Image (cartoon, grey):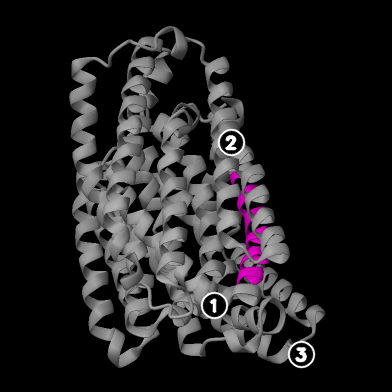
Amino acid sequence: MQLKNAVRNSFFGVLGQVILIIVGFFSQRTMNLLMGAELVGMNGVISNVIVILSVSELGISTAVVYNLYGPIARGDERQIAGLMNLYRKAYYVFSVVIMGLGMLVMPWIPSLINAPSFTTGYIRQIYFLWLARTALSYLLSYKRSILIADQREYLISIANLILNVVNYSTIIIVLQLTRNYALALTLNIAADMLNNVILAIYVNRKYPFLVALRKVPVGQNMLSKVVGNIKDIFVQNLFERLLSSTDNLILSGFFGAVMAGLYTNYCLIGDSIFYIMLALANAIQPTMAHFFLDSEEEKNFEVLRQVTFAFFFVNAAAAGCVFPLISLFVGDFWLTRDYVLGDFFVLLMTVRLVAMSMNLPLRSMMSAAGLFAQEKVTSVAVSVTNLVISLLLARPLGLGGIVLGTIAAYALQFICRVFFLFKNFLHHGLKLYLWDLAKYFALIVLETGAAKAVTNFLYREGRLYSFLLCGAVCGLMICAVNFLLFCRSDLARECIALWKNGEKQ
């Protein structure tokens, strides 16, 4: 049953991300061509500021979901209700805190965005709409946590899929008809609220004891445990959000909103692929947590190897398509040649994608195992590394220097997670796991280089059939090579055995 839930969560998570990518590209294209790269850059910087402000959420969502795994497995409705009641009260407070902090920051927002084409008033208006959208989302979104912990995240994926299609379609239609981005954001806020109301109604009907036990407090022991987790997760969230949000801020400050917009376009492509893999990681994380409740250390290690192996397969194909094809897509089919950046930057963006994606199995394992204190230490070191290196290299290397800082940060994150996971949870198998990783990274490098050579040979400029042919050949070639290399390996047989055992449960 657990495996079936993981597969169902993965399927709808990936389906939602794929459709989101498609409609997102149309929306981003509309914004670039109708409103200009400067608006795209401004939008990216504002969203990064909102992400940093929302750190006041403190990480309680992660802590509550983690602590829900056990009560759900035991069917302890009273403890589940107590945790959800704590969560509800905290999120009401966070909504007010985020709105208050955001309003305090508002006067300085225009100074963070080097966008001379827009007035100070317009920048603040867009910022306020983003802020209101975020603050309002906390009023009902806490209901989602029980669905995630109960391995029903596919329901959230379906709801988000519908919401994202509506929101992106709204942006496209409104910009085409009125060129009024503020109106589009206002309509997005209304759609967000409706989505949260519908999910809240479903949760109340699915788990009626949440309504009946609405005033039940969380036990003192559980409260102490949650608060302890929150202390660690707060620092982790703060510095992880700094890691993911500082690039646009640094770029806009050094080189202006136009360059930030060009960078945002490439990030949209790379991050869209990453979010597909993130959806897979999030889908299997609750299953891993339930598995760890009654599993042995040896089995946990094998699960890590198998999940890493699966992510390598996806990551290799993704890198082999992104590196040779991303600029062709941007310049010949999506936007125009004016939006294309150089080959060195494309190489760095590919390395960035690989570094982010290969971190995901370790991230899921660390969270499922409850190693929040170790993640806190890691996130601090990683964010400081990113900020220092990006600032030092921004002037001499430009955009490439900022991306290099991000790559160095994710590399350090990977090393720290391996160290802490094996020291505090798995305790053995480190050499074997490092050998697996060495093989995977070497293959990704070789296969990506081969894909670039194939594309240079096959591609005919501006012809869509040629572009699609190159993508198909690169992806299938890499998958076929890896299948032939690993189909007889012990790891592949273990993955098949895990699947068969999961079907019997």
Picture coordinates of residue 286, whole percent (x, y):
45, 35
Circle 2 SS class:
helix
Give the quarter of the figure containing the C terminus.
Answer: top right
Q: Between residues 100 and 456, which one lies in front from this camera angle?
A: 100
Residue at x 28% of width, y 57% of height = 105
Q: Residue at x 31, y 63 (%)?
A: 243
Q: What amino acid is found at the position of numbered circle 2 in the picture?
A: Asn
Where does residue 199 sit, x and y in percent of width and height? 56, 29
User: Where 286 falls versus 275 (above or below)?
Assistant: above
Q: Which residue is mark 1?
A: 37
Residue labelled with disc 2: 195
Residue 417 lies in the magenta stretch:
no
Q: Is there CB contact under 8 Å for labels 3 and 1? A: no
Dividing the picture into quadrants, the one containing residue 189 is: top right
Q: Nearer the viewer, mark 3 or mark 1?
A: 1
Q: Main secondary structure of the magenta part?
A: helix
Q: Earlier in the sequence, mark 3 or mark 1?
A: 1
Which residue range is magenta in the image? 13-31
Q: Quadrant of the N terminus?
A: top right
The answer to whether the residues at label 2 and label 3 have Cβ atoms under 8 Å apart is no
